Amino acid sequence: MHTESPAIPPKIRQPLRWPRVAAGVAIGLALLSGGGVLFLFNPSTHRFYPECAFHEVTGLNCPTCGGTRAAYALLHGRIRTALRDNALLVLLLPVAAVRGVWWGLKKRKGHAVGPFLPTKSLWWLLALAVIFAVLRNLPAFAFLSP
């Protein structure tokens, strides 16, 4: 009696890197283009930037109010102005940069790194943003408002 040997499955190929590279290049170009527009056009004098809907409706400052102006000031090397416009953004940018470099290096070496920001970190960031929003709307902490 003749028995057929089971078919050998094809080798599993590595996923193509080009789609990832293309996505990375596209994201990089979008960030560079957005940064270029922000560098050239001051949000305080040009009105094509989006307005804060929360501020428009409530009159209160949300945690991101002043963030575009702070980014503009940072691009021009004016750290004090950026801190005045949105201290939370300015103080979290170096933290995000360090985390991004660490995460990227671990991922590049093939280590399991999980999500960029673990759930516990997201809850801490949310709490920090809420506290910042409340404080910047109190008269005693008016220096936190843009």
Image (tube, rainbow, N blue to C red):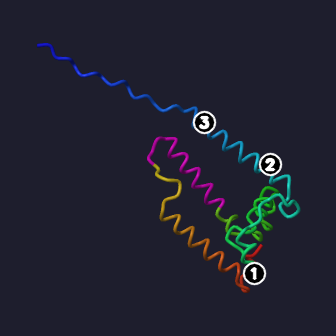
Asked whether disc 1 touches disc 3, contact meaning CB atoms under 8 Å apart, the reply is: no
- Residue at (81, 50) in percent of width and height: 37
Q: Residue farthest to the top?
A: 1
Residue at the spot of label 1: 142
Q: Residue 43 or 108: which is nearer the viewer?
A: 43
Residue at the spot of label 2: 36
The range drawn in magenta is 93-112
Q: Residue 131 or 61: which is nearer the viewer?
A: 61
Residue at the spot of label 3: 21
The disc, 2 or 3, on the residue closer to the chain's N-terminal end is 3
Q: Amino acid at mark 3?
A: Val
Q: Secondary structure at mark 3?
A: helix
Q: Residue farthest to the bottom?
A: 140
User: In x, y percent, where is residue 13?
Assistant: 43, 28
Q: Secondary structure at mark 2?
A: helix
Asked whether disc 2 touches disc 3, contact meaning CB atoms under 8 Å apart, the reply is: no
User: In x, y percent, where is residue 146?
Assistant: 77, 72
